[in-house]
Image (cartoon, helix red, strand yellow):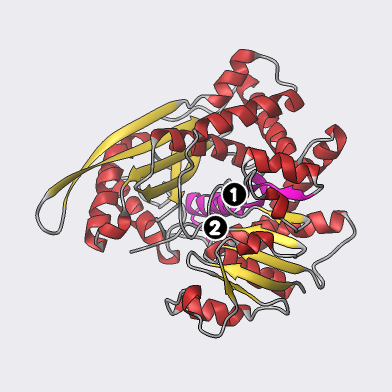
């Protein structure tokens, strides 16, 4: 099994401390949020609970191997912890702490009643068989079962995990605890309680934010040229959505190469090619370029949907698109952010633009809790309302305070988390 996250084709950890970056932007946005209490601010940066577990499994050849796993529960001020689980050899506690903090911000930005959490196992899943991956997932679940639950902490897929992983986790959790219903985890297969619309949620959420942003300036998708870095779940679905809306996708890339056509690419053909296991580097008749080339194409809209840290201080001057929609997590470094802002390029930040996945995860949780099954159209309609409401609030604050959409999004999230912490009856984690 070589699953991909909704918004990444590959995954690389940046060299600097991810948690330090998270804390720095919280400090910066707190001034816009009007949060001056240093104790409150420190509480919003610091995880409430950190779990590190040893995961022993027996490999197919009969040997034993020990893996290290994490589950960081950052904030329960607004509701149960919520966040994915990733499998990758570069997983570290610092990174998982940062990702858990970002989930707290993300759930607060879109105003769903959940907090933030994240998990990970330090492993190269490509080196394990399906049987070994199942054993790894089930043993990890055994180790953290006491710390998660439908009203406590609800995991989801992330890098190199998918609906099959979540099905294993849900099944093992029920065996260990006797608690069924599937609400302990989201991102499950449809047959095991997953939600319709989850497969396209990240792209759909980003599309709704982008359309709202364009409309706010009196513009639309008609005739817009679009470049997309990353052609996994989020990138491919984004290509379909913007094309249907009247835009022209002129450049896309996977982890091997970019394909470019100024007159517009055949998105359906590219998706079919990828579904057959193809890599863009092997497309004989295509005009190919390096994987980062979509970032620098002369287009109206750039959608980074692959790796972290792609737009940097070293290359931000080469970006030509006036709109950037971050479907990837952290594709723009702080140095690049400053350059793009100076150049007048509007960045729709990841904590808002790619929050569609967690919104529909919340919808899946609701359906499981109430034994309901919503139609895809209902899920998509609710997602559209949620994302557009979130954009309106963020853009209003950004205009009022003359700050970037990223800073405004953080500020709104921090205000909501602070209000929950200050309330007389905050969410209490059941035990």
Q: Is residue 264 above or below residue 343?
A: below
The image quadrant that residue 165 belongs to is bottom left
* Callout 1–callout 2 Cβ contact below 8 Å: yes
413 and 309: which is toward the camera: 309
Q: Position of residue 375 (x, y in %)?
A: 59, 66
User: Residue at position x 50%, y 41% from top?
Assistant: 82
Label 2: element kind: loop
Q: Does residue 207 belong to the magenta stretch?
A: no
Q: Where is residue 9 in the image (x, y as percent from the top left)?
A: 48, 60
Is residue 227 shown left or right of residue 154?
right
- Quadrant into which the C terminus falls: top left
Q: In this view, does 387 lie above or below 17?
A: below
Q: Tag 1: Cα neighbours inside 10 Å, few (<14), some, or many (≥20)?
A: many
The residue carrying mark 2 is 306
Magenta residues, as a range? 345-373
The residue carrying mark 1 is 331
């Amino acid at each position: 099994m070589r699953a991909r996250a909704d918004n990444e084709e590959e995954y690389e950890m940046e060299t600097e401390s991810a948690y330090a970056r998270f804390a720095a932007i919280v400090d910066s946005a707190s001034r816009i949020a009007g949060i001056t209490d240093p104790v409150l601010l420190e509480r919003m940066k610091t995880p409430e609970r950190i779990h590190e577990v040893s995961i022993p499994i027996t490999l197919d050849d009969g040997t034993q191997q020990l893996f290290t796993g994490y589950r960081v529960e950052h904030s329960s001020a607004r509701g149960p912890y919520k966040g994915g689980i990733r499998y990758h050899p570069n997983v570290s506690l610092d990174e998982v702490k940062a990702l858990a903090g970002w989930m707290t911000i993300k759930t607060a930005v879109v105003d769903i009643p959940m907090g933030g959490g994240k998990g990970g196992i330090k492993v190269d899943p490509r080196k394990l068989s399906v049987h070994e991956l199942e054993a790894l997932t089930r043993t990890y679940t055994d180790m953290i079962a006491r710390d998660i639950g439908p009203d406590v902490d609800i995991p989801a897929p992330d890098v190199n995990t998918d609906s099959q992983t979540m099905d294993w986790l849900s099944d093992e959790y029920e065996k260990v605890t006797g608690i069924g219903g599937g609400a302990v985890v989201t991102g499950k297969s449809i047959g095991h309680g997953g939600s319709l619309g989850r497969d396209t949620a990240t792209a759909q959420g980003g599309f709704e934010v982008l359309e709202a942003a364009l409309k706010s300036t009196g513009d639309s998708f008609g005739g817009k040229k679009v470049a997309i870095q990353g052609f996994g779940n989020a990138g491919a679905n984004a290509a379909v959505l913007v094309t249907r809306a009247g835009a022209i996708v002129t450049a896309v890339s996977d982890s091997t190469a970019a394909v470019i056509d100024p007159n517009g690419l055949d998105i359906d053909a590219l998706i079919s090619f990828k579904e057959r296991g193809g890599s863009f580097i092997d497309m004989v008749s295509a005009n190919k370029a390096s994987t980062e080339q979509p970032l620098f194409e002369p287009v109206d809209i750039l959608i980074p949907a692959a790796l972290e840290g792609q737009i940097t201080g070293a290359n931000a001057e080469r970006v030509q698109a006036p709109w950037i929609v971050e479907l990837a997590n952290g594709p723009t470094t702080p140095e690049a952010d400053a350059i793009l802002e100076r150049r007048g390029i509007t960045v729709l930040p990841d904590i808002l633009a790619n929050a569609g996945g967690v919104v529909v995860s919340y919808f899946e949780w609701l359906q499981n809790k109430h034994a309901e099954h919503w139609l895809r159209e209902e899920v998509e309609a609710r997602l559209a309302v949620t994302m557009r409401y979130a954009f309106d609030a963020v853009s209003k604050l950004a205009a009022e305070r003359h700050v970037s959409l990223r800073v405004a999004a953080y500020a709104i999230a921090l205000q909501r988390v602070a209000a929950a912490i200050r309330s007389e009856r905050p969410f209490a984690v059941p035990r």
